[in-house]
Amino acid sequence: MSATAAAGGAAAASRPALRARTGRFVVYGLVLAIGLCLMAAPFLFPEVRAQEVAARICVFIVLVASYDLLIGYTGIVSFAHTMFFGLGAYGTAIALKAWGPGWDAVLIGGGLGVLAAFVLAVLIGLLSLRVKAIFFAMVTLAAASVMMVLASQLSQFTGGEDGITYQAPRVLSPAFKLVTDADGKVVQLFGVRLNGKIVAYYFVFLSSLILFLAMLRIVASPLGTVLEAIRENELRAEAIGYRVVAYRTAIFCIAAVIAALAGIVRAVWLKYTGPEVALSFAIMIDILLMVVIGGMGTIIGAVIGVVVMSLAQFYLKDLMQVAADATAGVPLLPDLLDPDRWLLWLGLLFILLVYFFPAGIAGTLMGKGGHR
Amino acid sequence: MSDWRHTIDRFGGVMLLPVALAALAFVAIAQPSTWVTLTVAGLAMGMMIFLMASGLSLIFGLMDVLNFGHAAFVTFGAFIAASVLAALAAWVQGDSALLNIVALLAAVAAAATFGAASGWFFERVIVRPVYRDHLRQILITIGALIVAEQIVLAVWGGAPVAVPRPAILEGSLVFGDISVEIYRLFAFLLGLAVYVGLHLTLNRTRIGLLIRAGVENREMVEALGYRIDRLFIGVFMAGSALAAMGGAMWAGYQGLITGAVGSELMILVFIVVIIGGLGSIEGSLLGAVLVGLMANYVAFLFPKLSLASNMLLMMAVLLWRPYGLKPAVKG
Amino acid sequence: MSDAILRLDDVHTDIAQYHVLHGVSFDVPEGGVHVLLGRNGAGKTTTLRTIMGHWRARKGAVVFRHHDITALHTSEIARLGIAYVPENMGVFGMLTVEENMRLAAYSGRFDGDRLARIFALFPALETFWTKQAYALSGGQKQMLAIARAIIEKRDLILIDEPTKGLAPSIVRAMIDAFREIAAETTILLVEQNFQFARALGSGVAVIDDGRIIHRGTMAELAADGALQTRLLSLSLEAG
C-alpha cells in the first residue's frame, strides 16, 4: 500500500467527519435560533393566534423530546404517550374546575395526574417490557385506547367529548397587571402590554425550557450511555450485566412523568382540556411524525421536528387547496388533494422519510446514520 | 393439586376458559334467554375477530413482522363489501334466497380478493425493505395505515356508510323465549369453517408443516432447504384476505360503518393475539372467543366497562403467561 | 486438492460491526470425519454458519464440489446436498418427531431401509415417533437433529458441537453412530471435546481468533502432546 493511497484514505475518512461537524453546527444554530424566536415570541409575533402556536410548539417540544427518550434511546415504540400527557392535563383541569383557579389546584391535581402516569408506566413497563419488545407497542396501544374510552365515558369528571373549560390561576389571566405605570395602567413594551398573558406565555416557555434541559442532562448522564448500549445490542448489554428490563422501565417512567408534566403546562395555558387537545390518537400520530422528522435519538431533533410539522400543518393545507382548485375537473384527484386529506400526503412523506432518512433532519445533518 | 391440573389438561386445559367464563356469566346474568343471546353474540363477534387476528398472528409468527397496517385491510374489506352489496341491491333485497346468497358471497369474495392483492403489494413494497427492523417496521406500517385510511376517506367520504344486509340473513330464529339472530349464526359458522380450513391446512399439508416449522425456527427451515420468504408472501396474502373478509362480515353485522372501523377493531385484535400467543391459530381462536364473550357479557352487566374488561383480561393473562395462553413455540 | 468436497478460501466474515473470521482457509476431503477444533469464540460456529449462508462472507470463497456457494441462498446450499446440525440442534419442538423427519425428507416419504437403520442407531426416536419434540431430552433432541441430516443421503453433514452437555454414556453411543454415518458420507465436525474428536476424526484443523492455525491429520495431533498443548492450551476439555 503506497503512502498516497493511505493519505487519500485518510482524506476520505475525514470528509464525512467534516460534514458531520458542519452539520452539527447547522443543527445547533437552528435550534438556538428557534429557541431565541420562542423566547421573544410575544414581542416578535404579538397577535393572539401566533402566541397560541408558539405556546403549542413549546409544549410539544417537551412532549416529543420525552418520546424521543423512549423511542430514540431504547428503540421501543409506545402508543401511550398521549395517555400520560392527558393524565397530567386532565388531573390539572379537573382540580382547577373543582376548586377554582389557584396554584394549589394545579399542584395537587397535576401532581396526582403525574403520579397516576408514573404508576401506570411502572405497571405497563414491568408487565410487557420483559417479553418481546413488539408486545409493548400493542399493549400500550390497547392501554391508550381504554383510557380514551374511559375519558369519554366518565363524563361527570372529564366532560366527555366536550372536555372541561376552567380558569387558570389569576396571575396568568389577561386581567392581571404585571407592570403598571403611575396611573395604574398596564405598561407596554415594544407595543406589547405586560399583562397576565405575558406571564402565562413565559410560564409555558420557562417550564418547557427547564424540562427540555433536564432531558438533555439525562441523555448525557451514565443512564443515557447505558440506554444506548442496550439499544445497540440488547443481548450483549444483558451479558455485561445491565438489567435491561429495569433500565427500560426506568426510562419509560421518566418519559411518562415528563409527558404528564407537559400536560399540566398545556392545561394551564389553554384553560380547556378535552380529548382533542390532550388525549386523541391524532396527537400520538403528530408526536410520531415529529420525532421521526426531527431525528430519533438526538433530543434536540425534537425542536426541529415540532417546528417543521407545525409549519407544514399550515402551509401544506394551503398548498393542497391551490392544487385541489387547479385539478377541479379531474376525477378523484381533487378529493385526494382536499386540504382535509393533508394527512395522506404527510403519511406518504413519513414513509419515504423512514425508508431513506431514518435518522431524520437532525440525525442526517449530524451524520448519525440512524441505527443499523 | 397436580391431579386436579392433570384432569383439566385432559379436558382441554386453557381451552376450557371460555366455558368457565360462560358459566360464570350464566350465574351473574341469571336470565337464561338473555344469556343465550349474549353468548351467541359473543361467539359471533369472536369469530369475526378471529378472522382478522389469525392472519396477523401467523404473519408475525412466521417472519417476526408486526403489521400495524393490518387494520387497513379490515377497513377496505368493510367498505368494498358495502359497495358490492349496494351495487347488487336488487339481489340483496330480493325474495330469491339464491340471489341473496350470491350477492353476499360476491361481497365477501370481492373483499377477500382485494385483501389478497393489497396484501401482495403491502408485503412487496411496504414491509420487505424493513424486515428484521422492528422499529422501522412499526413506523412504516403505521404510516401506511394513515395513508390507507385517508384513501378510504377520499373514496367513500367521511360520512358513515350504510350496509344493506341480505334478506335471508335478516331476522331471528325463535325457540320459546330464546331468539338467535340469523346473521350472528351465519358469522359464527363462517368463522368456524375458516378455522377448520386453516387447521386442516396447517396440520395435514406439507405447506402447513412448513409454516408451523417456520413459525418456530425460520433459519432451520431454510437450512433444511426451503425458501421461507416465498412461503411468507403467500401467508401474508392469505392473512390480509382473511382480515378483509372479517371486515366485510363486520360491516354486515354493524349495518353502518365509518373509516375508523379497522383501527377501532384493531385494539381488540391486538388483545386477542396477545392473549392467545403470537403465531398460533388455536391461540387466536381461543383469544377471540374469550374477548367476544367478555365484551358482550360485560356490556350487559356493566355497560361502561366493556373495553376496559378486555384490557384487564389481557393484563391478567400477561401476568400469568407472558407468552400467551397457547404459544406457538415451546422449548 | 481437487478431491476436496468442500473448500474454504480466505473467508472473511463480519457479524454486525465485528470482524469474526479473518481469512479462514481449509479443505475437507471426501469421506470420513473431519474436525474443526477451537476454543469458545474462536470462530467455529461462524465458520459453519458462513458455509450454510446464514452469515455472508465479506471476502473469500466457499466452494462445494466445484460450485461456488458463497453467495447462494441457504436453501439452495442445502439442496446441493449439505445438511446442517446447529449447536442448538434446531429441533422443531411443536412438531412431532415424525414431522421433524418428514421436513428433512424432500420426497415427503421415508425410505423404509434408511428409517430402520436410523431406528437401530437411535431407538428413542421410534419410541417417541408421534410425540412433540419439545418433550425429548437433550440427548434425544441431538439424535433427532442428526437423524434429520441422514434421512436422505446428503454429501456433507456439518455438525456443531453435538456432545455439548451430554452424559458420557450418550457420547459413547454417539461415537458409534457417527462411525456408521461416516461410512457413506462426509462429516465436518466442530468440537471442543478433544477425546470425542480424537475417537472419530481423520483430518483436523484448529481455528483460533478467526484464523486456521494448524492443519493436519488427527493421528499426528493425537500423538504429539506438546503440539496439543500449544494449539489447544487449557481451554479444551480434557474429556
Image (tube, coloured by chain):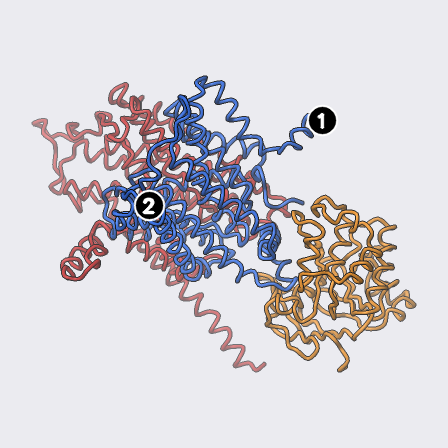
Which mark identifies residue B100? 2
- The residues bearing labels 2 and 1 have C-alpha atoms spaced at a distance of 53 Å
Question: Would you place residue B149 above or below residue A249 in this image?
Answer: below
Tell which circle, 2 or 1, labels the residue nearer the N-terminal end: 1
- Which amino acid is tagged 1? Asp
What residue did someone put label 1 on?
A: B3
Of the chain colours in the picture, the one used for chain C is: orange
For this view, does A37 lie left or right of residue B267? Answer: left
Viewer-proximal residue among A136 and B76: B76
Decide: is B142 above or below B297: below
Badges 2 and 1, same chain: yes
Q: Colour of chain A?
A: red
Secondary element type, mark 1 = helix
- Seen as rendered, the residue at the extreme right is C223
Locate residue B140, reporting x and y percent. Answer: 40, 54
Q: Is residue B284 left or right of residue A274?
A: right
Q: Position of residue A164 (x, y in %)?
A: 25, 27
Figure chain in blue: B
- Amino acid type of disc 2? Asn
Give how far across and how far down residue B102 sits, in percent: 35, 49
Instruction: Give the number of callouts.
Output: 2
Q: Quadrant of residue C230?
A: bottom right
Mark 1 crowdedness (10 Å alpha carbons): few <14, some 14-19, many ≥20: few
Residue at 43 percent across and 52 percent down: it is B240
Disc number for residue C70: none
Q: Of helix, strand and loop, which one carries label 2?
A: helix
Q: Residue furthest front?
A: B96
Mark 2 belongs to chain:
B
Q: Position of residue A158 (x, y in %)?
A: 30, 26
Q: Using the image as rendered, state which of residue A281 and residue A30 is in the foreground.
A: A281
Q: Looking at the figure, which quarter contains the N terminus of chain A?
A: bottom right
Q: Is residue C191 visible?
A: yes
